[in-house]
Amino acid sequence: MAAWSWDRISAEYIVTNVKLCRGAKLSRRKGFLHVRRGVIEALGSGAPTVEGLPRLDGQGLVCAPGFIDLHVHFREPGQEEKETVATGSRAAAAGGFTGVVTMPNTVPAVDNPGLVRYIIDRGKEANLCRVYPTGAISPGRAGEALTEFGSMIEVGAVGFTDDGSPVTSGALMSNALKMTRMHNVPIISHAEDLSLTGPGVMHGGYWSSRLGLPGIPRASEDAAVFRDVELARATGGHLHVAHVSTRGAVQIIRRAKEEGVHVTAEATPHHFSQDHACCRDYSPLFKMSPPLREPDDVAAVVEGLVDGTIDCIATDHAPHTATEKEYQFDQAPFGVTGLETALAVGITHLVRDGRMDLEHLVRCMTEKPAAIMNLPGGRLEEGSDADFVLFDPDHEWVVDPDRFHSRSRNSSYCGESLTGKVVATFLRGRLTHRDETGSP
Amino acid sequence: MSFQAKAVIMNGKEMARAIKRMAHEVVEAHKGTDDLVLIGIQRRGVPLAKMMRAAIKQVEEIELPLGSVDITFYRDDLSTLGPNPKVAKTEIPFDVNDKTVILVDDVLFTGRTVRAAMEEIMDWGRPRAIRLVVLIDRGHRELPIRPDYVGKNVPTSQREIIEVRVTDLDNKEEVVIGEVNGDDPQS
Amino acid sequence: MILNRKDVLGLEDLEAEEILSILDMSERFRAVFDRPVRGVPIMRGRTVVNLFHEPSTRTRISFELAEKRLSADIINFQAASSSLRKGETLRDTAENLQAMRIDMLVVRHASAGAAHYLARVLKCSVINAGDGAHEHPTQGLLDIMTMRQRLGDLRGKKVTIIGDIAHSRVARSNIWGLTKLGAEVTLCGPPTMVPGGIDRLGVTVEYDLRRAVAQADVLNVLRIQLERHESKSFPSNREYHKLFGITEDVVRGLKPEAFVMHPGPMNRDVEIASEVADGPRQVILDQVANGVAVRMALIYLLSGGDPGALAGGDAE
């Protein structure tokens, strides 16, 4: 038997001694994954029957499909001091992701086929994960007219959004949903009523009142989600609600789904694990949009994930420089990174708390997001690309931003102890990340 | 830090005698009591000043005006100061301008307290003169300050401590010499 | 009780005994004002920087006077309003000050939490002179000092704070300090100016001005600045005066011994009628005088070093 080498991975090999996570089932028995020329040749429980191939001892780790994140900000072009497609891809691989959907609120905004192509090319250069750009709904994200959806889809755009800002005009949103229905791609809604947000910098409630910071009421999100859901109902378009943070939004989406509206939704790790009390020391690391809400909102988001109202977990990975996060709370930019902590936050706050099983968590990060955006991957199947991750669901570690692969350090979990660590990530059978501290 | 008494160096009777003697000396040197005022330094200088006033009254049948100064805000070393909110009162219920102030304290040591007290009194006006009365002079002066009237000279070592006890604050009258177990002798 | 801390950022952080200690010390300093020389030399050689990142006349003058009366060396640092946003970060400012080896920083900043940030990164003492809509601890202390001078022990006393609670750092410091001392605090103002969840700080919210006034031992009337409100929280000064203005008629509804306070500067005939502002029920100038004393006490208490040094008693 040929020896396995991390440095020189063969075109064909077998990963043995892993717990395969396929669909709703996490195999209790140890199994194997046979990779040939970047494709899953075979997989199953027990020992592989093929002899003579290099083998990697998976040491009992979980082997899951590579994670897919529907919501990341890679900041390129225009804000490369925060992140680039290359550094973001590196962070994605470190978090176990093999596919990411980038938001178009770069400088300038991704509102034309040239920029869509640019992002894809940068992604291919980095070659660490699949980078799927979304395009802006409106030129310059100004909310005034529609961009050329068809031309952008032709070069690879997977959906459209003005993320970072809402589409204020209901008429424009309605038209966007109609057009994307024709193209069979989703509109991603950053649901926010800016007049209600006003000067708000954190959730409007007890803590904002106590800290003397202007608050963002729940209604800012609820009202906007409600409008967009009704527009999706009216147009038949596919609405994907980004970063759901309120109890009200979860209820609106749940009812809309029951009534057959084509709506899907995502929630971020921070919104299902942290609440507004985190802002008590004025640390801008807890400043994000939408803001950290109240404990009952957090509970509602968790419940939404558990019952499927919220389809998937997306990080809203939003890097900012250390300098920017040293401004006073009200002056600092919104956003936190998330790619490198997502799995661990999920395991720590959902699986270990008994709210969902590990398989469910994995589905929320793999096949469910893939289905929403019609992306390849998300499943371990014979004949599909060998995008997969090996992780240790019981490994405890302390978040140290200095060890991040992202260019930025603005994590809201700095210094926290989390459980679950990605050990290795593979893209088309090729190793894209290996945790130096973990096994094997 | 704890105080360990070694010996009583003055009992109540001796204290009273010393104060009475100093009262006589003050009146004699001043040729009477005109424009004479008493100011005690908080805290134990104040009851001693009261005793002084009573002694002078016995001789001259006149009750001198009595004030008190707390020198906390006039200390020269803020960094060794324990910020004690129970700072005693500075009360000077008379005009000090052109008066002769008899400043009374219990123990004269480095001279820094007296320096502070004089500065504070000067912020109240311009006395014609300030005279210093102390019950005990233990030496070790750090400033050029000299008492005008002394109850008793007591040579001490730097490590020793002298405690003056008065009825108002301690329920007895005596002067005790002792030592401190710990770092700081008297400031 | 000894004030043994590096900074005073808000009354939220202080224990009731600490507040009382500061007030006792303030009374001592107030007594100094009656002498021919109204200062003391205790802070000689100490450097205090007044960093005002937001325009303020009264508070800055009051701090400056307090520092001068303590004989401190003073540097006034009035940051141009442009450099406080982007450009120079608060951290740059802080590091500059650190390099200058100052002893104490008094900071006013438009951002809530700015003083807390500086206190974390600086070795010197920091006094918050107002951070955004968060806290204004020295104003809270001087208000409480003024109340205590007239009411004695504040336990069970009823204080009504009237006005724009949402944007008021004065209100928050009053709430923290007063509730710690056992007073019963009622907030009164237009619903658009009373922030959600504020009752969880242990206060009562009352929208009916007459009812809020009738039971009060003190009215603390906040300054209203409608022009600063982005979101149209109130139609006009005239309407405000009609519904929430403290007029002579409103004052007639007060208990006989009750009195009226205002942190200044006043908008006459908006939140307070001129007749009341100049009338017999107000104690506004007492507040101003107490403000200097409170600031002296706070600066003095924060400057004290090792609290054990005096334990030997009052030797010499």
Image (cartoon, rainbow, N blue to C red):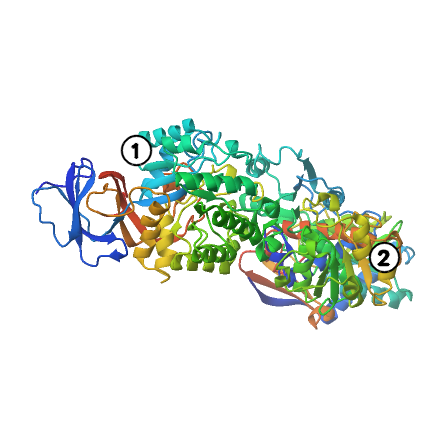
Residue highlighted by disc 1: A127
Residue C316 place in picture, x, y as percent: 68, 57
- The subunit letter for the residue under badge 2 reads C
Using the rendered image of the protein, determine whether residue B70 is visible from the camera's viewpoint: no
Q: Residues within 10 Å of mark 2 (few under 14, many from 20)?
A: some
Of the 4 image quadrants, the one containing the N terminus of chain C is: bottom right
Amino acid of disc 2: Thr
Q: Nearer the viewer, mark 1 or mark 2?
A: 1
Quarter of the rendering containing residue A437 = top left
Residue C13 place in picture, x, y as percent: 60, 57
Q: Residues within 10 Å of mark 1 (few under 14, many from 20)?
A: some
In the rendered view, does A3 fall on the left or right side of B132?
left
Report the front residue among B53 and C108.
C108
Q: What label does residue C247 carry, if any?
A: 2
Q: How much space separates mark 1 and mark 2, taking CA atoms?
A: 73 Å
Residue A69 place in picture, x, y as percent: 37, 44
Q: Residue at x 18, y 35 (%)?
A: A8
Residue lying at the far top in this picture: please name it.
A114
Query: Which type of secondary structure does the marked residue at label 1 adopt?
Result: loop
Query: Which type of secondary structure does the marked residue at label 2 adopt?
Result: loop
Amino acid of disc 1: Asn
Quarter of the rendering containing residue B40 = bottom right
Report the front residue among C222 and A161.
A161
